[in-house]
Amino acid sequence: MNVPSFAFLAFAAAVAALVNVSAAPTWRRAVLLVANVAFAASFSRDSAQLAPFAALLVAGFLALKVLERDKRGSVFVLLLALQLVLFCWLKRYAFVPPALSLPWAYVTVGMSYVFFRVLHLTIDAYQDALGERVGVVSYANYTLNFTSLVSGPIQFYRDYRRTETEAPAPLTRSALGAAAQRIVLGFFKVSVVSPVLLFAHERSGIALAAALFAVYLYANFSGYMDVVVGTARFLRLELPENFDRPFAATGYAEFWGRWHMTLSMWFKTYVYSPLLMALMRRYPSPAAEPYLGVLAYFVTFFFVGVWHGQTAMFLVFGVLQGAGVSANKLYQIAMQRKLGRKRYRALCARPAYAALSRGLTFAYFAFTLLWFWASSPQLAAFGAALGVAGAAAAFACVAFAAALALWLIEAAAAWFARLRAGGAPLASSPYVVTAWCTALVVLTLSVTAVLNAPAPHIVYRAF
Amino acid sequence: MTARPLRVAAVIATVLAVTLAIVAAQNAAIATLMPHLGRLTTDFSPAFLRRELDTATARPRNVVFLGDSVLWGYRLPVEQTAVSILAAHGCVCTNLAFKSGNPPNDYALARVFRARGVRPRAVIVEVNQKVLSAADPEYRTLHPAVAALASPYLTGADRAALDVPAASGGLPRGLDGALERAWLLYAMRPDIRAALYHDDDTDAPAPPATAAQYEGSYDLSPLTARNTGVRYLDSSVAALRADGIPVIAFLTPTNHTLLRDYIDSPAYAANGAFLRRLLERRGARVADWDRAFPAREFIDNDHLTAAGQRHLAALLERLLHEARLE
């Protein structure tokens, strides 16, 4: 089943109706279990195609049960390594010899996101940080949660359990209205904004294509997030946010704190923090501390980049993400040393500086995405056509245009937020919200009718 | 007590007002901005056909072309088709050929011309022996858009003889019809899609044609007035001539080098002669171009390459000149 699609909405509506029949935890867990398993099974009718996915889940559960009893470091490392090997093998990473791959096509949708949840359980079970023993139903519901199976968000177990069983989110009229509004907005982003941007991207020159792809990716993935977060709310589940206006970021490190936030948080928890701690133990010098942080950032965001694909191209993408974040951190360290913390903060607060920083951040992200969507021959052709000077000029143009566009968007949003009707902000008027949502629905139906295509492709579904 | 119902009514009014405003804006934008594409799209809608007919009606000295995928320009971009070349040379022409064109569709269009007051200066009809095969039901099937427009003008006998495919929109017919009448974007959705994403078959190279592919495609049994295609070809020319519209017919160029084992027979030649006599008897001017094109100008059995379309355009131009219709 595609997410988002009208079939998904119908399925979620049926599950919401059933799950809200009773507030009893057993009922909720039972309905969610049936729904989660049914949703996962909807990707194939052939059990052989579902078996590898099931094997990954079973392996994760067995590791969890072992680590709940046996806390030896060697056992933990062995189980972690086994799970990593199993995942890389099933995901057919380029370094795994094809001869070793399973000789049939099988379901891998959402496997990365499930794997992050399984690793989180494994590590936290070893560290005794889960706070409870995880039963098979809780494990299945958490790892297979149908609202976040396909492309996340990556929720931590205790946060999931809170609204699944302990304190389901209240079904108030305003909460449901906001959830419905989010679903409408999500569908609009995925069904209208992303196809339009993709259409323009495929017909543009390199610089514009790079910029359009970055916005397309944002519309596509954040639209998906809006749909699943809104849908989950009808089940009284609360999913974590994955985006916080990423293009408002004034630095690359901040950007990754606003883009795919649950992935960044996972890597911060399980890669950055342990690595930094280990480095600081190994090199216990206060002077070296900031640079160790930069190194830890590089390693962390290298892995964040590499996670996005199975080929060597994504090694380059990983290096560029790591380089972007660590260079940004080095710049901050250097500027604070040169200007002092207070003067540097004042500089950052200047509108022109902030706008330029936003433009540069956007342009860097957009150009690193070349390794995300362009093939090697295309990259070579771009390089040959532009040369170093041309590439620099294209980068500068995108940065300047993005700075201007983002400043205009921020100004328009601030102006709209200031508008008031009857003493209350206009944006919160139920009639304005109704008109806005109606417009989005009509435009979504218009584009759906014209394209007459299956539910739009979610880029992050492939990871 | 009254606050809540009033508020719900206001919300409903807001929804209706916004919906109507957007639909009206879309209708105006499409009516103004939707381009004339030079030929019908593959899945053209009744609304698009109606628009093309209205344009044809409004143009003085217009020449209308009827035919199948050969005249439509299979596997070629629109600007390389014969009719587009003629238009570029100054001919005022409308290409109403389409991929599954056949005599029953030509007849239905002739009836629509009469009903809607379309009076072209001449109608050029492509006559392809292949589409007169009695064995293939596709050749007695109306295009859904043609059927939708011609439906009021078809007799019971026509309905019994012809296949009219059911609409496959997924919506109930009544709702579908209401949406098509009120919402131009919905009504012309396949055409808008074709305009955005290009409606030609040029994405992938054509696989090399072999004679064996066409075994059975040409029905060599003697053509008679009982053949559905022949009957409707005769009726469409008669209807056009009865309205005083000059008709020029040409027999479709065919790749005899490729198909010689299947069609180079007295039966095929006799059927060609039969068609010429039939058309001339109805007062049509006939050009027999069945063997007029060399093999290198074909993509397959009858579809022409860009060079073939240029050749066809040159022949059509000469024909229009001779008929004083250029």
Image: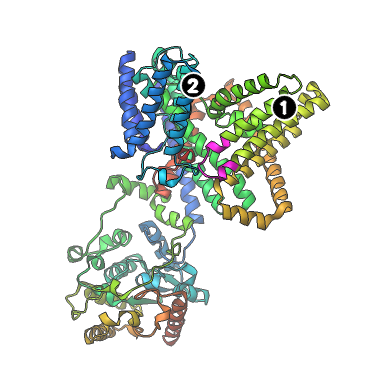
Q: What element does badge 1 sit on?
A: helix
First in residue order: circle 2 vs circle 1: 2
Other residues around mark 1 within 10 Å, as few (<14) / some (14–19) / many (≥20):
some
Name the quadrant containing residue A261.
Answer: top right
Nearest the eye: B181 or A97: A97
**Residue A456 in the figure: left or right of residue B155:** right
What's the distance in space between the residues labelled 2 and 1, CA to CA?
Answer: 31 Å
Host chain of mark 2: A
**Residue A340 in the figure: left or right of residue A453:** right
Q: Which residue is mark 1?
A: A291
Q: What element does badge 2 sit on?
A: helix
Q: Position of residue A382 (x, y in %)?
A: 63, 54
Nearest the eye: A190 or A84: A84
Determine if the magenta segment contains residue A309: yes
Other residues around mark 2 within 10 Å, as few (<14) / some (14–19) / many (≥20):
few
Where does the N terminus of chain B fall, quadrant-wise?
top left
Determine if the magenta segment contains residue A401: no
**Location of residue A424 with respect to A327 vertically, above or below:** above
Q: In this orientation, does residue A152 appear? A: no
Nearest the eye: B250 or B322: B250
The residue positioned 69% from the left and 26% from the top of the image is: A292
Magenta segment range? A304-315
Q: Nearer the viewer, mark 2 or mark 1?
A: 2
**Residue B75 in the figure: left or right of residue A418:** left
Q: Position of residue B98 (x, y in %)?
A: 36, 67
Q: Which residue is mark 2?
A: A74
Residue pushed farthest front?
A74
Q: Position of residue B276 (x, y in %)?
A: 28, 85
Three-letter amino acid code at the position of disc 1? Tyr
